[in-house]
Amino acid sequence: MSPHSSAAPAALPAAQVMAAIGGIYMAQSVVGGIAFQGVPALLRDGGARLDQVGLAYLAFLPWALKFLWAPLVERRRLPQDSLRRRTRGIVLPGQWLLAALLFLLAGLGQPALPVLLAVLGLIALVAATIDIACDGFAVEQLPPGRRGWGNAIQVGASYLGMFLGAGLFLVLAASQGWRVAAAAMGGLILLLTLPFSLVREPARPAGTAPHRPSLAHALGRPAVRLSLAITVAFQAGTRLAYGMTGPLLLDRGVELASVGWINGAGGVAAGLAGTLAGALAIQRWGALQAAAAAMAVQAGTLAAFLAVVLDGSAAPSWLIALALFKAGAMAAGFVTLYAFLMGQASLAQAGVDFTLFQCADALTATLGGLAAGTLAQHLGYGACFGLAAALGAAGTIAVPALMRRLAPHPVSGERSV
């Protein structure tokens, strides 16, 4: 039996899987919301330059580079000498450490930028490592017929986490101070870990062939290489625009607390609507056609955003409306893209393969965030959102073409190389 053609593993009850991954992915987004929306907005409100705001995206590097240690995590999670899975032994201690670091951040108060970036980087390192194991768990425990709704749960939970990390964090920081906001987020991480703590993973099927997870095995598969290109093309435009949306609203006269609510309650509502739309699109058309449609919607939204940015007389309400619509389009895109990518991960090392796809997305986000800050600072918001719109338009052509090259093959990573 080849390592990428292992039999489908025994699955946990669907409700338990959905609750477990929902809690963990929500916790991941709490951290992401703090680092990539909450902290940039606070820095800008405190008078930081846009290129300094962009430095906050360096904390995204662990998510971009976690593929380097993903094989080590996956070898621990799926030992060669046993059929047991050890996901809980990685995820639970990691979540507890993550909460402890947020409590440390609360104790430090709002530190100087170098210290803040260092602590955020350590938090990101822990969260990214947890994510490797959780991704493998999700791919294993979500059969193909449930991947659309499983990704909807993940993305929906992520938007709720974003509400708490980017929205509630900003509101608490503005009204109660940094210490209360960071401590509240640490307590929330512990609460969100509870559903996963109840999981008891089934062993892998008897007869599963021994396999040593590796990057070489992943990158040796054409499906993985094509999927990496798909991820970058799909996300490039949206990721470039994402980082400067909050600072743009602030610079157009929207108050910090209002940006918090826009990122939070409004973003959650838009994100959940987009999540539902993405899941329904997958049910109706399949992952490939649904992802192509989501790509087109994202490109159209970026073009509209550029038009409003260039119109200096446009009321802030137009930008707010487009920011919310963009959040919904991003959510639909995440659901459709990752449902497709789950099908390209080998069951023998799902944590490694799926991590590679996420790292391509995270690296795109990191470079996009840094480039957005530089472009906006030196050339203006128009240059930033103009390039984002151009990349989105190019993706509407490239993404469907690349996906069709994989379409003739069965999904779930159970095909020959």
Image (cartoon, rainbow, N blue to C red):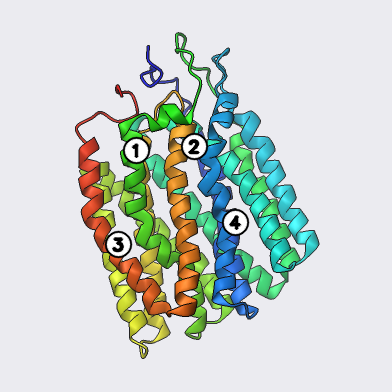
Instruction: Identify residue for label 3.
Output: 392
From the viewer's perspective, is the residue at label 1 or at label 4 nearer? Answer: 1
Could you tell me which secondary element the residue under label 1 belongs to?
Answer: helix
Q: In this figure, which residue is indicated by the disc labeled 1?
A: 225
Where, quadrant-wise, is the C terminus in this rendering? top left
The amino acid beneath tag 1 is Arg
Q: Residue at x 54, y 75 (%)?
A: 50
Tag on residue 59? 4
Q: Which dot, 2 or 4, sits closer to the camera?
A: 4
Q: How far from the left and from the top, in percent, is residue 289?
A: 22, 47
Which mark sits nearer the N-terminus, 3 or 2?
2
Image quarter of residue 52: bottom right
Query: Which residue corresponds to mark 2?
Result: 135
- Cα distance, mark 4 to mark 3? 25 Å
Can residue 338 be seen here? The reply is: yes
Residue shown at the point (35%, 28%) measured from the top left: 413
Q: Quadrant of residue 315?
A: bottom left
Choose mark 2 or mark 1, whichever is in front: 1
Q: Which residue type does callout 2 highlight?
A: Asp
Q: Secondary structure at mark 3?
A: helix
The nearer-to-camera label among 3 and 2 is 3
Q: Residues within 10 Å of mark 1 (few under 14, many from 20)?
A: some
